[in-house]
Image (spheres, coloured by chain):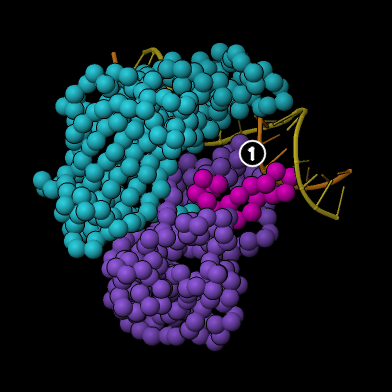
Chain colours: A purple, B cyan, C yellow, D orange
Amino acid sequence: MSNKNNDDSRISLRVRIGHDLKRRIRAGEWNAHTALPPERRLAEEYEVSLGTIRAVMSDLVDDNYVIREQGRGTFIHRGKFDKSFSRFFRMNTDGLGAADGHVLSISSRQATPDETKKLDLDQESLVVVLERERTLDGKVTITENIVLPRDRFQVFTTLSPRDLEGLLYEKYEAFAGVLINSATEVLSIRPATQTETTTLQLKAEEPVVVIERIAQDLAGYPVELRTSVGGSFNFKYRIEIS
Amino acid sequence: MSNKNNDDSRISLRVRIGHDLKRRIRAGEWNAHTALPPERRLAEEYEVSLGTIRAVMSDLVDDNYVIREQGRGTFIHRGKFDKSFSRFFRMNTDGLGAADGHVLSISSRQATPDETKKLDLDQESLVVVLERERTLDGKVTITENIVLPRDRFQVFTTLSPRDLEGLLYEKYEAFAGVLINSATEVLSIRPATQTETTTLQLKAEEPVVVIERIAQDLAGYPVELRTSVGGSFNFKYRIEIS
DNA sequence: AAGTGGTCTAGACCACTGA
DNA sequence: CAGTGGTCTAGACCACTTT
């Protein structure tokens, strides 16, 4: 344990060790496929009892930092966005697979003031922009505009769209070492533009659903701004509340 | 502990005691304002250690059965639906309070096949139907159609709309002893009908957002079917994913 | 002061996974 | 088989709320 809070005995061991482990996870001490040290070893390292380590791990599970598997070990968690996203824009004709994503172009430019704010960038920072579309049965169902901070995604400017086929978040991890962990989405509806009516093959007067996503890494730092647009009449979204 | 699973030693104490406490909670052994027995007493009653009871309580918290308050006690949980619902249909002109709900009519009829299925009713059961609207600054923003199983909401046929002003779920608890704990909502968009365009004062060609909610009691049994309709261009919904 | 939940210890034994 | 997380015990002491 090193920095600031982590020696303050006013804060419980459970919380302090939790903070430290989160820091170590974010620092990349373990990747998505290597297990964290077992409970017993962590208990020795931190010089606390097994029960305390178990309480800490329980918190990390609640916070979606790790998943535990009996007999195998404790592994760092990865969000299931593509799964959750495919719940969006689910077609009324149920039972068919999620739409495939294809990157159309990769470019680079200066961030807009809005992007600067939402990605928590410095003034006049550069961003990498991806244009992407999702197709289902050969038809374009969603268009996506994705904005990434250039300092963490520099390599992307050297890639071709073909390198980014499939699940985008796996590419973030593979090429830029960025692990997406959580996101906030805001959903709204507005009339379609002429272009959208054409490319999305919308019905007359059919408005579009716009979803603006801000995705965070394990540190909670915003690393992706994604705007998705799709037709609204085939759109369904399912929410569970408690 | 009494029934079936609860003496099967193949199942952990943690789970068995959890089941038993859930059963007791659902049976109404404690109401929303009386605390459950303290940890130490439960440990004696079930003849297990304190740590085991704490593990059980932790599960009950995760499952939204109870909330714990240090120094006060453990209380049964109540969903925060009106709070979460007011996130729906938030007007673009932010910062104003949630819409007030007013019941317009209370009636009774036979359930449709769809309602029978969704509310898990017997064939030819009766339902109580409420018509409700939500207004903001004097304007109707949402119309709601609410369907309740008559066997659990018989008293509602004797009430007047004035008895149901305000938070509806509090009335369910007060008049029918039904405690809403969780819900699933499905959101979709469709063109507005002529009537909707008038009553909701929609813009030309503005479609509506339709939200179909199935709400469950503590036992997970469906007790309310609610269909809400509102204009889509002022609609925003915020989702957090992890 | 009495009573509540929260933290923590120092173990023991069980259930599951993988080599 | 060794190593992992899961369950459980029998306490002690602390922090907070209410009377």
B238 relative to A14 in the view: left or right: left
- SS under mark 1: helix
Quadrant (top left, top right, bottom left, bottom right) of the C terminus of chain A: top left
B152 relative to B39 in the view: left or right: left
Can the viewer see residue B204 in this picture?
Answer: yes
Q: Residue furthest left?
A: B138
Q: Which residue is mark 1?
A: A50
Q: Locate residue B115: give its quadrant.
A: top left
x, y percent for residue A8: 45, 47
Taking the spot 33% from the left edge, 56% from the top edge, the residue there is B190
Which span is picked out in magenta? A60-76
x, y percent for residue A86: 51, 60
Of residues A53 and A212, which is closer to you in this image? A212
Q: Label 1 is found on which chain of the structure? A: A
- Against A84, residue B155 (above or below) is above
Q: Locate residue B2: give its quadrant.
A: top right
- Against D17, residue B87 (above or below) is below
B76 relative to C17 in the view: left or right: left
Taking the spot 34% from the left edge, 79% from the top edge, the residue there is A195
Of residues D3 and B200, which is closer to you in this image? B200
A192 relative to B43 in the view: left or right: left
Quadrant (top left, top right, bottom left, bottom right) of the N terminus of chain A: bottom right
Taking the spot 36% from the left edge, 68% from the top edge, the residue there is A203
Q: Verify whether residue A152 appears in magenta.
A: no
Can the viewer see residue B32 in this picture?
Answer: no
x, y percent for residue A72: 72, 49
Amino acid, disc 1: Leu
Q: Verify whether residue A73 appears in magenta.
A: yes
